[in-house]
Image (tube, rainbow, N blue to C red):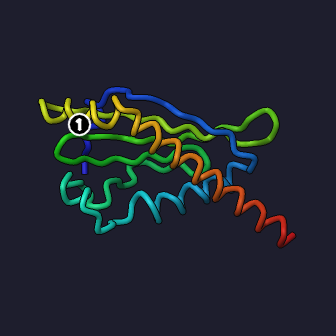
Amino acid sequence: MNAGNTELSYVDEHAIRIAASRELVWTALQRYVVTSLCTAHAKPLVRILGTEPAAGFEVAESTPTERLTLIGRHRFSRYRLAFEMTDTTDGATQLRAQTYAAFPGVHGRVYRALVVGTGAHILATNHILRSIRRLSLQLAAARNSDA
């Protein structure tokens, strides 16, 4: 699927510091994407929006421990969500989520106002980042208990 990546405009970026190695954060990110973002759920909103793929996202680019890019589209928007990882000076990992999207037509502008304009997108993106941090820390604790 081509979500029109070259035509997408920058929406925003959010970041979180995770006290775990990039390898653990990468594992947590992949698990979260597979179980939460790229899994078709029988949700009414998915049917209403007409998402492609059905789950809403698919992996467009994957560079282990560095970058994972998801793309998708629906009736009112085309979008890209890119996760990037960098090391912090104290040995933790910074995970950034960058959003790009296009909202064509009148319905697209209304949808943007409802999702981006109300702050719902910020809440959703921060929820994703916190979930990945929580999973990363669980993986780190499990690894430490096995050692």
State the residue at coordinates (23%, 55%). Answer: 52
118 left or right of 68 in image: left
- The single residue placed furthest to the right in the displayed view is 147
Circle 1 SS class: helix
Residue 65: give x, y in percent of width and height. 61, 49
Position of residue 105 relative to residue 52, above or below, is above
State the residue at coordinates (53%, 34%). Answer: 14
- The single residue placed furthest to the front in the displayed view is 118
Q: Which quadrant of the figure has residue 102?
A: top left
28 left or right of 109 in image: right
- The single residue placed furthest to the left in the displayed view is 106
State the residue at coordinates (58%, 44%). Answer: 66
- Residue on which disc 1 sits: 111
Q: Which quadrant of the figure has residue 36?
A: bottom left
108 left or right of 29 in image: left
State the residue at coordinates (74%, 50%). Answer: 20
Position of residue 128 relative to residue 142, above or below, is above
Task: Classify the position of the C terminus by image quarter.
Answer: bottom right
- Which amino acid, mark 1? Tyr
Position of residue 21 relative to residue 126, above or below, is below
Residue 32: give x, y in percent of width and height. 52, 59
